[in-house]
């Protein structure tokens, strides 16, 4: 098996041959020497390579961990690809014309050769530690957040000091001697995930969007080749991050940096898995090299203060400022319904030279994510991205929404081999879903309390979302699938009982299952409910619970030990906080009330007289119109709440048709009249048309006609109700030819005493205006954290307050930033922020719709330095611990 992989000497021989054949494209140099005397080879590739150091550059490093052979294999294959496709492929020509590639195929030559020849699982370099142990983990030996340790036998031993090793010294000296490096990609295995760099803050960073989109666009290139989905996961700083990594060292120098974890094994079957990993990553690498210039000094400046001006149920107005310069530039705007999405031609929604844009035709109550960048008109070089903007559209006038979160004791996992401890997994551990040798079969369990939803809720939209936090335990390529099922809660007496959960028969399994090559890490996974599944939610309202089971594969092929996926629950010492909780986002309608209102007055308005108590429409002897006018007085429908009209229609019944020899049509209009007036009805503009016209032929066949109010007419009708104004409808005849003494007599009452002419409205009770802005919003430091306080309103419709943080601009909506709190308290702590960094906070009042108030906003900036505690990693089980220790 291993003979198919290249050796370090074989790599050097290949590169020397390439340099001899393509001297203008490739340069080969040693940037240092290892403990065992091997050269650390740096490949430089660029069109006219003699001037390579003058161009924006991408740095590639591979196989810093000895057993992770993908780094050197992909590097050699990518070099061969560039040479073979230059100058025939215009994308390759563009990449090498505008950019330089610096590539260290193997940053750990000694360790790689030891892994190749002696012990395939070897990870470190080959330093003699002087105590009978060998090796330093080079990816723990860089100077950022270096961790001192004396455990020289550990697989993650970082060395006696930062940059103590010749390998890290070599790359440090190379990087610090060149200021043209813009992007650094560090290739590892395993996990099929991008790990963008950190600055060890709790806060979002200005380059965070650039990193996510770079990774997302590279992931899209991978997906186009094999349909495999790579994740993007920055972790949750400052906890659970590695010490002394190259990734953070590059990022600290202003270089966009990410680790790329490839494949599901370190040294897989070459012909199937390794070759596939190489093939799918070459287009992604080419994309990164081509767009490297967009993060260079040649790029336009980043747009600033990207925010919203107005959000409605179906539109959002985006606004921004140009940054340092704007001449000769235009803007590209991208929209997605998921965070960390790619920004490509497929979701480019606008190109504009303006500093605002209104995006229309959106769906109500939906989350949208917007990205913005600037483009130079002449060079076509693009700027870095503005920080991603998150919004949620408003609800339609007849809609409500509610987001369900499980309480801690109602979310956890049950394991086949952990029966004695399954109850302890709830509210504490991540959701382990799948199967491994240690835990056996594992299911995730989420028990949602539905009692806070009204029993008559009619679900319009339902979205269930999970945050995948670790997929390293899914080790088998293209094996198994993960899905979500609805269980009958009446059949489950103990949600922590493995046998009950294991043997439960699902009522329904949601949507499409996730195949193993579609498992992502760090990107929310969502399931949209179908119409049938939404009906099932409504059935569970009667039970007051919605019980979900998350399941994966239940057996392992021979020779394998794990196919396990890990999802965040938000709670406990392993959770990432409240904004990582699995959630069920619902938009729903309420069952409307119906009211039929009889007319309060009838008028027949002719050119020379007005007849009260009669209702006619048509033409008189002189061919002048006869108008029928109907008045309605709407009663008060609720003294407790606002009223929203969800439907309305006008019912009209003809008594007789007189003298109509030519086709005639009749329309209904809403008018604003103090008194019935022929001149005003003849020349005035109607307020709204009601429904469709009816013909005289139609009336002859069907005397009773219904005219439906459209949304605009319903709004006017509702305004009349709110302002206690009478509703006046005019019935007007039209004809293509002149008519005389032709009219319709409309019924004003039926023989059986029921109303023939009536206005029927359907309505719900729903608050229409938001509450007032919270008062007395303040921030101060307490115990090293930012404490936020405000005054809650004295309003019976108030449900709670919602607090959000944004590092870049004042949050204009509750979804424009990181959620910190929602509830009835008058204070909260920012437990996830860095108190040393300036940021914006907003607090909103909300009701049960919810309508959100205008925000109270403050900018916080501490005058003192607060120590940030760097929590040490704590593993949830022995498997996770072994992985963390490099085993």
Image: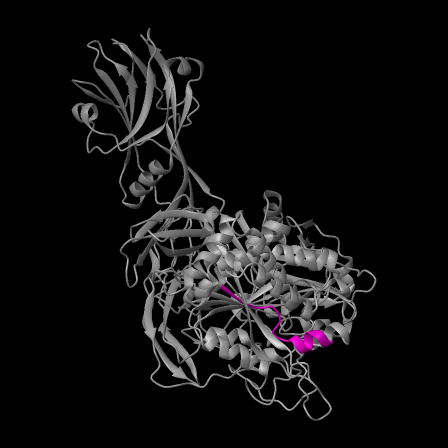
Q: Residue at x 72, y 52 (%)?
A: 506
Assign the N terminus to one quadrant of the image: bottom right
Task: Write down the quadrant of residue 326 in the picture.
Answer: bottom left
**Image position of 386 (left or right of 585):** left
Residue nearer the viewer, 185 or 794: 185
Relative to 46, residue 696 above or below: above
The magenta region covers 101-114
Relative to 92, residue 860 above or below: below
Counting from the top left corner in percent of width and height, residue 523 is at: 56, 60
Counting from the top left corner in percent of width and height, residue 29 is at: 55, 72
Q: Is residue 482 magenta?
A: no
**Image position of 817 (left or right of 142):** left
Task: Write down the quadrant of residue 274 in the picture.
Answer: bottom right
Relative to 676, residue 778 above or below: below
Residue nearer the viewer, 409 or 138: 138
Q: Residue at x 74, y 56 (%)?
A: 271
Assign the C terminus to one quadrant of the image: bottom right
Task: Write down the quadrant of residue 495 in the picture.
Answer: bottom right
Counting from the top left corner in percent of width and height, residue 343 is at: 47, 53
Residue nearer the viewer, 58 or 38: 38
**Image position of 690 (left or right of 547):** left
């Amino acid at each position: 098996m291993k003979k198919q992989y290249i050796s370090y000497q074989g790599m050097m021989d290949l590169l020397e041959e390439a340099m001899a054949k393509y001297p203008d494209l490739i340069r080969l140099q040693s940037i240092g020497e290892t403990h065992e005397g091997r050269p650390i080879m740096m490949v430089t590739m660029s069109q006219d390579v003699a001037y390579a150091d003058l161009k924006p550059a991408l740095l590639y490093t591979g196989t810093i961990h000895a057993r992770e052979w993908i780094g050197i294999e992909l590097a050699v294959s990518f070099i061969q690809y560039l040479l073979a496709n230059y100058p025939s492929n215009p994308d390759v020509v563009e990449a090498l014309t505008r950019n330089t590639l610096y590539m260290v195929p193997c940053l750990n030559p000694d360790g790689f050769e030891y892994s190749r020849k002696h012990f395939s699982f070897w990870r470190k370099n080959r330093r003699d530690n002087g105590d009978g142990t060998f090796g330093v983990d080079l990816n723990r030996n860089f100077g950022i957040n270096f961790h001192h340790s004396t455990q020289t036998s550990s697989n993650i031993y970082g060395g006696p000091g930062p940059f103590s090793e010749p390998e890290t010294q070599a790359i440090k000296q190379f990087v610090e001697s060149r200021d043209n490096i813009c992007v650094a990609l560090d290739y590892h295995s395993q996990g099929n995930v991008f790990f963008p760099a950190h600055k060890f803050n709790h806060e979002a960073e200005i380059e965070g969007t650039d990193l996510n989109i770079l990774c997302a666009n590279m992931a899209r290139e991978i997906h186009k080749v094999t349909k495999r989905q790579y994740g993007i996961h920055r972790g949750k700083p400052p906890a659970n991050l590695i010490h002394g990594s190259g990734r953070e060292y590059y990022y600290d120098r202003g270089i966009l940096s990410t680790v790329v974890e490839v494949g599901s094994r370190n040294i897989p079957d070459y012909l199937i898995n390794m070759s596939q990993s190489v093939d799918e990553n070459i287009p992604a690498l080419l994309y990164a090299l081509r767009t490297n210039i967009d993060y260079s000094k040649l790029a336009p400046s980043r747009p600033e203060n990207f925010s919203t001006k107005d959000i409605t149920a179906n539109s959002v107005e985006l606004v921004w400022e140009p940054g340092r310069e704007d001449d000769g530039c235009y803007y590209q705007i991208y929209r997605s319904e998921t965070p960390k999405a790619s920004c490509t031609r497929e979701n480019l929604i606008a190109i504009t030279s303006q500093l605002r844009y209104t995006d229309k035709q959106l769906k109500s109550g939906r989350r949208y994510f917007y990205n913005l960048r600037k483009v130079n008109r002449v060079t076509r070089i693009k700027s870095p991205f503005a920080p991603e903007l998150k919004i949620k559209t408003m609800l339609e006038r007849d809609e409500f929404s509610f987001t369900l979160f499980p309480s801690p004791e109602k979310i956890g996992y049950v394991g086949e081999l952990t029966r004695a401890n399954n109850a302890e997994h709830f509210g504490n551990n991540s959701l382990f879903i799948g199967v491994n040798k240690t835990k056996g079969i594992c299911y995730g369990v989420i028990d949602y309390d539905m009692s806070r939803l009204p029993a008559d809720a009619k679900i319009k939209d339902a979205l269930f979302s999970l945050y995948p936090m670790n997929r390293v335990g899914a080790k088998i390529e293209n094996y198994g699938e993960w899905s979500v099922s609805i269980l009958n809660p009446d059949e489950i007496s103990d949600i922590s009982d493995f046998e009950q959960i294991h043997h439960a028969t699902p009522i329904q399994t949601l949507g499409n299952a996730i195949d193993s090559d579609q498992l992502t890490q760090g990107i929310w996974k969502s399931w949209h409910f179908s119409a049938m599944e939404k009906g099932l939610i409504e059935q569970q309202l009667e039970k007051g619970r919605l019980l979900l089971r998350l399941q994966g594969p239940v057996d392992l092929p021979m020779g394998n030990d794990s196919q396990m996926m890990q999802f965040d629950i938000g709670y406990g010492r392993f959770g990432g906080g409240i904004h990582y909780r699995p959630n069920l986002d619902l938009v729903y309608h309420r069952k409307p009330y119906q009211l039929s209102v009889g007319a309060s007055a009838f008028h027949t308005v002719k050119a020379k007289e007005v007849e009260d108590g009669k209702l006619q429409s048509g033409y008189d002897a002189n061919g002048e119109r006869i108008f029928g006018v109907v008045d309605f007085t709407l009663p008060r429908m609720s003294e407790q709440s606002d009223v929203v009209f969800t439907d309305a229609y006008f019912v009209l019944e003809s008594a007789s048709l007189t003298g109509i020899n030519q086709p005639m049509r009749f329309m209904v209009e809403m008018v604003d009249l103090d008194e019935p007036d022929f001149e005003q009805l003849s020349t005035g503009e109607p307020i709204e048309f009601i429904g469709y016209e009816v013909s005289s032929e139609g009336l002859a066949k069907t005397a009773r006609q219904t005219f439906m109010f459209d949304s605009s007419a319903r709004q006017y009708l509702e305004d009349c109700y709110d302002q206690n104004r009478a509703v006046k409808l005019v019935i007007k005849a039209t004809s293509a030819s002149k008519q005389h003494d032709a009219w319709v007599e409309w019924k004003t009452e039926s023989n059986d005493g029921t109303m023939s002419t009536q206005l029927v409205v359907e309505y719900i009770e729903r608050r229409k205006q938001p509450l007032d802005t919270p008062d007395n919003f303040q921030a101060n430091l307490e115990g090293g954290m930012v404490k936020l306080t405000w005054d809650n309103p004295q309003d019976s419709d108030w449900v709670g307050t919602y607090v959000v943080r944004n590092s870049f601009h004042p949050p204009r909506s509750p979804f424009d930033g990181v959620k910190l709190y929602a509830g009835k308290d008058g204070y909260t702590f920012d437990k996830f922020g860095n108190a040393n960094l300036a940021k914006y906070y907003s607090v909103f009042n909300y009701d049960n719709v919810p309508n959100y108030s205008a925000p109270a906003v403050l900018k916080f900036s501490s005058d003192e330095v607060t120590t940030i505690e760097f929590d040490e990693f704590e593993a949830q089980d022995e498997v996770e611990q072994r992985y963390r220790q490099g085993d």
